[in-house]
Amino acid sequence: HKRVVLEESIHSPSLEGGNNTGLSQRRSLCELHCLEHALYIASNVATGLDAHKDAVMETTIPTSLVTCLKENSHAQLKIAALWGIINLGWQDNDTKSLGDSALSRLHKLQEMGLVSELISMSDDASIDVKDRVRTALGLFEKAKLVEHLVSVPNSSAYDCLDMQEDS
């Protein structure tokens, strides 16, 4: 039931713009906040162990995250979805290479068309969105699923990962 609610919220007509007035504006705002919180819940689950992240990957949540990035123009929703993606691809250890589980998750996200969507978002109006996009693309670079992305503003999408590994 929770999966259906998340997917229905992402595709809600009231979230896609239009002439909202009064009650429908408040409803739309409420839906945005609910969706944002649902995305952060999914993102928080994805901060756990590989087993937790793999379990998330077996649901419709990754598809919902990608869909949210593709179909919503709201910066706060994009940021919440990007955190979910970053957390799914993140690996907490001191090695320079990703483990098999993280590689598998990133490969599945790549197959959903996420990398091209991230690249198209690299010049988003929101600085926070651009920062999260750089971090997410850095994970794909680290996994060697994409070449170094010189088209991403501020050079390497990998900078934040390099800094963490050097400390």
Image (cartoon, rainbow, N blue to C red):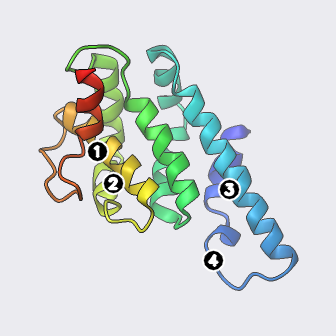
Q: Residue at x 71, y 86 (%)?
A: 19
Q: CA distance from mark 3 to mark 1?
A: 26 Å
Q: Which residue is mark 3?
A: 9
Q: CA distance from mark 2 to mark 4?
A: 22 Å
Callout in the foreground (3, 4): 4
Q: Is residue 166 left or right of residue 21?
A: left
Q: Residue furthest bottom?
A: 19
Q: Residue at x 31, y 48 (%)?
A: 134
Residue 158 is situated, as x and y percent measured from the top left of the image, at 23, 39
Residue 135 is situated, as x and y percent measured from the top left of the image, at 34, 42
Front residue of 105 and 29: 29
Badge 3 amino acid:
Ser
Callout in the foreground (2, 3): 2
Circle 3: element type? helix
Badge 4 amino acid:
Gly
Front residue of 142 and 15: 142
Choose the circle earlier in sequence order: 3 or 1: 3
Choose the circle earlier in sequence order: 2 or 4: 4
Specify the quadrant of the image occupied by residue 148. top left
Q: Is residue 147 left or right of residue 104?
A: left
Are dots 1 and 2 in contact, CB under 8 Å? yes
Are dots 2 and 3 in contact, CB under 8 Å? no
Against 10, residue 22 (above or below) is below
Q: Which residue is mark 1?
A: 137
Q: Which residue is mark 4?
A: 17
Choose the circle earlier in sequence order: 3 or 4: 3
Circle 1: element type? helix
